[in-house]
Image: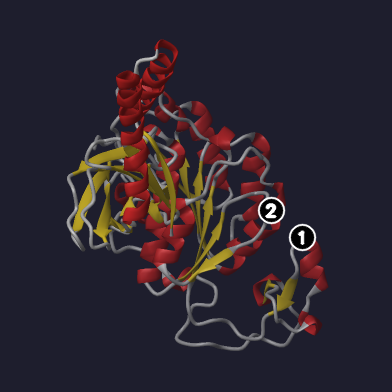
Amino acid sequence: MARRRAGFTTRASCLLAAGITAVLCGVLLGETDLVRAGVLAAAVPCAAAVVVHRSRVRVANRRSVDPPRAAAGQSVTAHLTITNRSLLPTGALMLEDQLPDRFAGRARFVLDSLGSHEVRTVSYRMPNLGRGRYRAGPLRIRLSDPFHMIDLTRSFTATTEFVVTPVVDRLPPVEPARSDDLGESSGSHSIGSHGADDASTREYRIGDDLRKIHWRSSARTGALMVRQEERPWRAQTTVLLDLRAAAHAVAPDDMLEGLDPRLTSSLEWAVSAAASIGSQAMRAGRDVGLIADPMQPERLRFGDSGLLSTHLACVQPVSHSDFGPIAGLLRAAARDSALVALLGRLDPPALRLLADAHPRGRSSPAFALLLDVDTWAAGPDRDLGDGSAPSETEGAAAVLRSAGWRVTVVGQGSTTAQVWQVLLAGFTTSGRTAAVRR
């Protein structure tokens, strides 16, 4: 649907003003010829307005983007298809399409006259988009009569929404040992009937029989737990994504232009790694859960990598810095799945909570990619030196390792494929991957 609005151009306004002035002067001076000339000059734009309004030129717009789902850093091309649905040709067309909020202004094009039922397509490119959800449009078209006296503006309401997902890297075909996962066997099997300890309970899910709630485990974990009579055959992987704004860093503004956002923001690296690890787990036949926002204590479950990427495309840093609301979720995830944590800077309360979530001796594996956030704050052009981690980061890694986590420290420039292979290879003595430029 389009809204139609007409108005005089500057040329028409000047001619109309000159005509009225001539008429007034002619009347005052008694010059009949001057009055006639003024009337003629004022009549031209008025006649043009009548002709344009009665012409009923109908213009339609159809729009699309390519690709409909892009990865962060890619360019997206918008296509606008303009159709003249009337029997009369149009004048010159000025097209103005509203750009997404990230860009200033509008995309502008000038089209020559469109013949009857003629179709023409114009395109423009939006480069280097970061992850997120975008909206382009609506389109506004300005038509003009052959003498450029009248501007007829038509504003369409249709817009195009598209998603830019995090970059998903193809990871090496390695995964946590299936023998370590609770619930992993050749099929489903029953649990013994002698009581119900932590290994025989799971989180409450909507639809579970309330009579199966295990109150002792619920009180201990802080989350509602139910007795588990049968273990699932499919292995599970839970990804903890640290979204706390205080835990991440961004390179200085003068270093951001045109670079891969994973090189300039530790949060963007973590989001991309979460998408990559989740997609790899799904390809391996695992169920994937995601714990992200501390203020929304729930484990989101995904059965499709596309849904996971779409969700991660829109996550934003949160101001809340306390992991406390998700403590019960983390303990439950450490019991019933392989837990993979993507962590930024850890303060003592967060470090203590993570260590308590997976005490040494648990059969289910827990892995942590601990981001050396200061290397992102220094920027891509920093001097890497000898690659040693700051004592604060290594101290946090040592605490997690002593609690049974397998930890790899990640520096700016490292790839997800590198750190994933190192993490699962069990190199926890140093846990440092070489920083590689892209």
Q: Quadrant of residue 351?
A: top right
Category of crowding for the residue at label 2, using alpha-carbon neighbours closer than 10 angstroms: few (below 14), some (14–19), many (at least 20): many
Residue 403 is labelled as none
In the rendered image, residue 207, in percent from the top left (x then y), is placed at: 70, 81
Estimate how packed mark 1 is, as few (under 14), some (14 to 19) or many (20 or more) residues with alpha carbons within 10 Å: some
Question: Looking at this view, is 334 or 3 the one in front?
Answer: 3
Q: Amino acid at mark 1?
A: Gly
Q: Is residue 316 left or right of residue 66?
A: right
Q: Is residue 11 left or right of residue 299?
A: left
Give the side of residue 240 with respect to residue 284, left or right: right
Q: Residue at x 30, y 24 (%)?
A: 37
The x, y position of residue 95, in whole percent, is 30, 43
Do the CB atoms of the residues marked 2 and 1 lie less than 8 Å apart?
A: yes
**Residue 299 placement (x, y as % from top left):** 60, 62
Q: Report the residue marked by disc 2.
A: 327
Residue 385 visible? The answer is: no
| Image side of residue 176 versus residue 398, left or right | left
Q: Nearer the viewer, residue 124 or 404?
A: 124
Residue 388 position in % (x across, y down): 38, 28
Q: Quadrant of residue 270?
A: top left
Figure quadrant of residue 21: top left
Q: Is residue 159 above or below residue 185?
A: above
Q: Disc 1 marks which residue?
A: 222
Circle 2 SS class = helix
Q: Nearer the viewer, residue 217 or 155?
A: 155
